[in-house]
Image (spheres, helix red, strand yellow):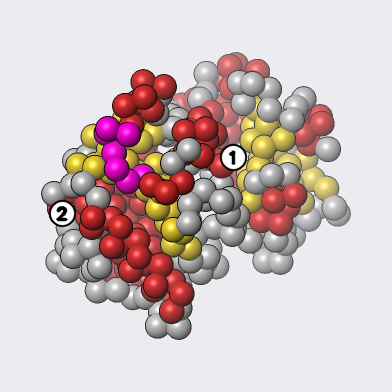
Amino acid sequence: MVYVSNLPQSQPGYQTMLRQAATRLKQAHKLAIFTHQRPDPDAIGSQTALACALLHRGAAVEVISLSESAPPYEFLYAGCGASVKTFSPAWAARADDACDTIVIVDTCAYQQLDPAQEFLRGRREKIVILDHHHARDPISDLVVSDVSAAACVEIVADLMPLLEAPLNACSATAMLAGLVGDTGWFRFDNVTPRTHLLTAQCVAAGARPAELYAKLSQQERPARLRLMQRALQSLAYFADDRAALIVLTNDDFQQVDAAPTETEGLVDLPMQLKGIEVSALLSEMPDGRFRANLRSKTWVDVNAVGQKFGGGGHTRAAGCRLPGPAAAAAA
């Protein structure tokens, strides 16, 4: 199946950057595809869908992981056919021989690329970025950005006709994973007609929504529920019960035998309550800093909050990192 672009015709600048990126990628022979730490379904889906398209063209492709991903998402890597590598000094030492082009998907922020930041800073001319977030660091001169996209996979999908790559079951599954991941299975207000058109094309090309839901959302360990209990025990309310805060420390993770990747979705628990506008999850990292996940329902711009602390993201979903201890991060 050939993907038919749903690209709005009112974005000439975006279309120009898409064409430039397509030209660069078609000229590439060996590529490495990066995304942010703690990759979510959109990040991995964007990596693997693009890998499918580039492999179809005969390019050599390596998908690069900067950190551990949640176990339920690992099947997305397995299905793309590309070589999956963990970023390391050894990989970086051979990188200039291993790749002539670097693609970064679903982020344009050095903070989210921390393990590879020094490596990437020295290779700006090699880098192509595909992203849909507001925050942008000067990582590359070739940035294909569309903040109206519900997920980064929508940008990958817009590239596919220019790469003359078909939409097959592999890339369709990867892109559907990205769509449902970043829209909360179409619950969030970032959903557009473009999102649903791409969803229909993915299903027609072989993606199976029920099977995908089972793999993404029904493969948790018992430790995940124990961690959820801890999260709810820490739940506190502020601003006349319009804001909610959850704090998880390293002790919490150790005592329930949970991994940091098992916090996915916990920040959304307070959003079920009437009157809550903002929810924040603070989860401690091994170095004592706290990762902050921020969500809002209707009017608070959490991207602006995240940017205040060196992070960012979307208007309704963003993040940042804060120094510990827990009380200082919460304050």
Return the disc, 2 or 1, that comes first in the chain's sequence. Answer: 2
Residue holding disc 2: 57
Query: Does the magenta run of residues contain 97?
Result: yes
- Residue 206 location, quadrant: bottom left
Disc 2, SS: loop
The residue drawn where x is 79% and y is 45% is: 237
Q: Position of residue 253 (x, y in %)?
A: 59, 22
| Range shown magenta | 96-102
How packed mark 2 is, by other alpha carbons closer than 10 Å (few <14, some 14-19, many 20 or more), is some
Label ID, residue 99: none
Q: CA distance from mark 2 to mark 1?
A: 32 Å
Amino acid type of the residue that numbered disc 2 sits on in the rendered structure? Arg
* Image quadrant where one finds the C terminus: top right
Crowd tier of the residue under label 1, counting other residues whose Cα lies within 10 Å: few below 14, some 14–19, many 20 or above: some
Please give the residue where the numbered disc 1 appears in the rendered image: 111
Quadrant where the N terminus is found in the figure: bottom left
The percent position of residue 212, horizontal first and vertical second, equals 30, 49
Under mark 1, the amino acid is: Gln
Q: Nearer the viewer, residue 272 or 104?
A: 104
Specify whether residue 17 is in view. Answer: yes
- Nearer the observer, 251 or 316: 316
User: In percent of the image, x 71 and y 66: which residue is there?
Assistant: 299
Point out residue 246 in the picture as x, y percentages from the top left corner: 70, 38
